[in-house]
């Protein structure tokens, strides 16, 4: 296998990865899509900083942890690439709206490698419309090196792209789950997908709609099956704090949001393992997420995981399943909305395209 870009699942031996950056990160301006996916206690943060850079101290501390992650990966023999610098404070102007940017901190959200294909997500937040360009130099290089490359059609992100009357306090009026993103255009973030070889699982969320899921399904073709799941997370955004495969046959689930009944029968022969409660109390510094970032570790291979150093109960659990944890400080990155899995995007994992069900 001499492909430069190749990854079929979340656990094969990692050979090359992109690690995000918080340089020039800008706090997005509050809107219905942001409000649908972020905890209500953080509104003050967006009111105060929306359109301005994240406070320097937050960026410095998170940047230090990202640089350390890079060293840890390189010491394991993994090739690490970083995004191109981009000025996210520049306001972009479209025919319908204007917006400042966000960051290039979460490559997992904007792109995914499926087999030898790089898929660019269209995104659904205005602040993320141009984020992919921080990764374009890399993608163009990978394309020259033989990768296939698909960019999903970007939604207009006009007002009609969103359910303007979405109420985060009542996401299920009449018992039917509503989402902030409407159904009239293609929308998905890559992080709403998780890869298990020939099977991928996806959830609808505040940024991923049925048309987005169907777009991925048709483009991946008959070799792959896309299965849609739905959990109890009140405001779903990215699947990687809900279910995390450890290796073939073992699935870690978030016990607050995922019940075994949510999983299709294809998981009947799998061991379903409940993640321990987060060690970090759900505090107000988590502006974009819940405290379940606990589960958001990165598998280097089936026996090795890079885990935030305070997540002791998780490390103990992983050890019981034969997985050795490499602890790293990452708490100062959490307020940007993700942990180690979000902060990375796999480019190459050594392995073959298989079926595990
Ligand atoms: N919505 C998730 C939570 O609140 C956060 C997931 C972050 N993942 C990511 N790829 N950015 O726990």
Image (cartoon, grey):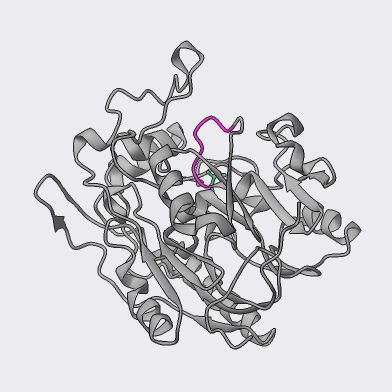
Q: Is residue 54 above or below residue 33?
A: below
Give the residue at x 40% y 34%.
36
Specify whether residue 186 is painted magenta: no
Observer-nearest residue: 152 or 207?
152
Give the residue at x 48% y 18%.
176
Q: Position of residue 329 (x, y in %)?
A: 64, 66
Q: Position of residue 196 (x, y in %)?
A: 67, 57
- Among all residues in the image, which is located at the extreme front? 222
- Which quarter of the picture shows residue 59? bottom left
Q: Position of residue 71 (x, y in %)?
A: 60, 83
Give the residue at x 32% y 76%.
85
Q: Is residue 264 above or below residue 9?
A: above
- Which quarter of the picture shows residue 245? bottom right
Q: Please give the range of residues in magenta.
A: 233-238
Q: State left or right for residue 60 relative to residue 301.
A: left
- Classified by dominant secondary structure, the portion drawn in magenta counts as loop
Give the residue at x 19% y 40%.
158
């Amino acid at each position: 296998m001499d492909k430069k870009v190749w990854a079929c699942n979340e656990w094969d031996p990692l050979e090359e990865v992109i690690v995000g950056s918080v340089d020039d990160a800008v706090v997005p301006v509050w809107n219905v899509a942001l409000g649908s996916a972020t905890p209500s206690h953080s509104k003050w943060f967006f009111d105060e900083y929306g359109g301005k850079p994240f406070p320097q101290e937050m960026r410095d501390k998170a940047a230090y942890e990202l640089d350390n992650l890079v060293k840890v990966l390189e010491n394991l023999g993994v090739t690490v690439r970083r995004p191109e610098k981009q000025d996210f404070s520049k306001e972009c102007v479209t025919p319908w709206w204007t917006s400042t940017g966000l960051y290039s901190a979460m490559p997992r959200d904007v792109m995914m490698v499926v087999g030898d294909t790089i898929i660019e997500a269209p995104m659904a937040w205005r602040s993320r419309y141009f984020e992919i360009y921080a990764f374009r130099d890399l993608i163009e290089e990978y394309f020259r090196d033989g990768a296939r490359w698909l960019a999903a059609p970007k939604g207009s992100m006009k007002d009609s792209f969103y359910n303007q009357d979405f109420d985060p306090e009542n996401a299920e009026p009449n018992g039917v789950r509503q989402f902030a993103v409407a159904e009239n255009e293609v929308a998905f973030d890559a992080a709403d997908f998780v890869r298990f070889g020939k099977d991928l699982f996806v959830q609808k969320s505040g940024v991923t709609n049925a048309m987005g899921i169907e777009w991925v399904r048709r483009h991946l073709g008959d070799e792959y099956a896309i299965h849609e799941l739905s959990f109890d997370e009140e405001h779903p955004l990215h699947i990687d704090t809900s279910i995390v495969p450890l290796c073939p046959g073992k699935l870690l689930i978030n016990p607050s949001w995922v019940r075994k009944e949510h999983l299709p029968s294809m998981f009947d022969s799998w061991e379903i393992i409940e993640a321990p409660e987060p060690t970090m109390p759900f505090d107000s510094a988590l502006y974009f997420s819940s405290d379940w970032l606990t589960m958001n570790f990165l598998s280097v291979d089936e026996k090795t995981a890079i885990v935030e150093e305070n997540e002791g109960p998780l490390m103990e659990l992983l050890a019981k399943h034969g997985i050795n944890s490499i602890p790293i400080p990452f708490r100062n990155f959490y307020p940007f909305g993700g942990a180690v899995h979000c902060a990375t995007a796999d480019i190459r994992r050594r392995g073959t395209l298989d079926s595990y069900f």
